[in-house]
Image (tube, rainbow, N blue to C red):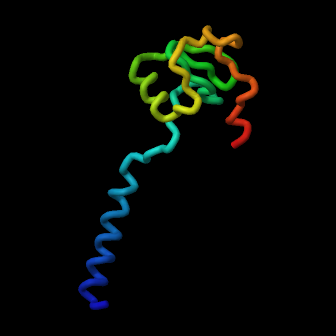
Amino acid sequence: MSRRIKTLVLAVALLGGPLLAGAPALAAEVTVGVGPGGIAFGYADGYWDRERNWHAWRDREEHDRWREANREHYHGWKHDRDHDHGWHEHDRYWDRR
């Protein structure tokens, strides 16, 4: 490799590193700002956190973001339709990670 190309590669690495470090990280799993455990199960009318507390969604955006990122743990109906009010004790998926 010529000296000119090596210099160019080094300059890009030195200048590009800090730019990339300042970029926001993309997460595979979206979490919503709830208690230490996070959301366990989401419903159209709210969600259970992992400590078994019920919460209403703060707004439609929070609901939609979590639903899109966690489809396997989201149910498109009100939680009280289920006999257990939506708390699925048999599906504690976060304990299996």
Q: Residue furthest left?
A: 4
Relative to 17, say whether 72 is above or below: above
Q: Residue 72, percent across and down?
A: 57, 33
Q: Quadrant of residue 95?
A: top right
**Which is more toward the observer, 55 or 7?**
55
> Which residue of the protein is positioned furthest toward the right in this rendering?
90
Above or below: residue 31 compared with residue 26: above
**Residue 8: % across, % down:** 26, 78
Q: Residue at x 26, y 84 (%)?
A: 5
Judging depth in this view, the residue of 30 and 83 nearest the camera is: 83
Query: Count the marks: how many?
Result: 0
Q: In the displayed image of the protein, which residue is found farthest to the top? A: 80
Residue beneath the point at 33% across and 57% down: 19
Picture residue at 36% right of the left edge, 59% below the top? 18
Question: Which quadrant of the view contains residue 51?
Answer: top right
In this view of the protein, which residue sits in the foreground, 72 or 48? 72
Where is residue 40 drawn, in percent x and y? 63, 27
- The residue positioned 34% from the left and 69% from the top of the image is 14
Is 33 left or right of 92, judged from the image as shown? left
Task: Answer with left or right where residue 88 lies relative to residue 2.
Answer: right
**Residue 68 occupies which quadrant of the picture?**
top left
What quarter of the picture does the N terminus occupy? bottom left
**Above or below 91: residue 96:** below
In which quadrant of the rendered image does the C terminus lie? top right
Side of 3 relative to 77 (left or right):
left
